[in-house]
Image (spheres, rainbow, N blue to C red):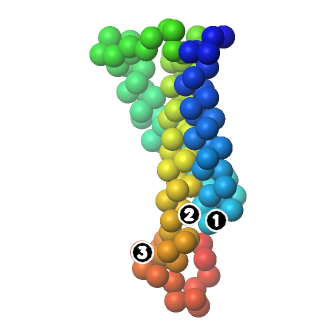
């Protein structure tokens, strides 16, 4: 695999690496795997189908020079991973911001201190 073909995977790995510490600052994404799967999978499925249809119909294309050539679901593995990695990073960021601001996820307002954190 060439450096160009690894670049997309490297960017995805860096996204995960950069946001991973947010789990310990209150992101609580990896500690709740079922909740995370329920949040990411339906959205990823919709966009993966959309992406596959668009690629198959020629609406857009991916340069083979910039993807590994390994595929899943008729898409390059990088595209499949994109629709998992980016939402994970977004969930981590959102959860961390909420935790740092002390916002209750249920009420959307600051916690009183008496409530149990979700």
Tell me which residue sits at (52%, 89%) in the image: 112
- Residue 83: % across, % down: 50, 35
Q: CA distance from mark 1 to mark 3?
A: 19 Å
Discs 1/3, front: 1
Tell me which residue sits at (51%, 83%) in the image: 111
- Residue 13: % across, % down: 63, 35
Front residue of this view, candidates 94 and 18: 18
**Residue 71 showing in the rendered view:** no
Farthest left residue?
Answer: 59
Say which quadrant the C terminus sits in: bottom right
Mark 1: few/some/many CA within 10 Å (<14, 14-19, 20+): some
Front residue of this view, candidates 100 and 88: 100
In the image: residue 118, left or right of residue 24: left
Q: Which mark is residue 108?
A: 3
Q: Are marks 1 and 2 in contact (CB under 8 Å)?
A: yes
Mark 2: few/some/many CA within 10 Å (<14, 14-19, 20+): many
Write down the residue under mark 1. 25
Sooner in the amino-acid sequence: mark 1 or mark 2: 1
Sooner in the amino-acid sequence: mark 3 or mark 2: 2
Write down the residue under mark 2. 96
């Amino acid at each position: 695999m060439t450096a160009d073909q690894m670049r997309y995977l490297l960017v995805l790995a860096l996204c995960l690496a950069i946001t991973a510490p947010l789990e310990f600052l209150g992101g609580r994404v990896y500690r709740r795997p079922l909740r995370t799967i329920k949040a990411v999978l339906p959205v990823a499925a919709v966009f993966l189908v959309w992406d596959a249809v668009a690629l198959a119909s020629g609406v857009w294309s991916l340069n083979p020079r910039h993807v590994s050539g390994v595929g899943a679901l008729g898409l390059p593995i990088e595209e499949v991973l994109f629709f998992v990695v980016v939402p994970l990073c977004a969930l981590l960021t959102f959860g961390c911001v909420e935790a740092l601001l002390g916002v209750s996820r249920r009420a959307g307002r600051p916690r009183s201190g008496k409530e149990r954190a979700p």
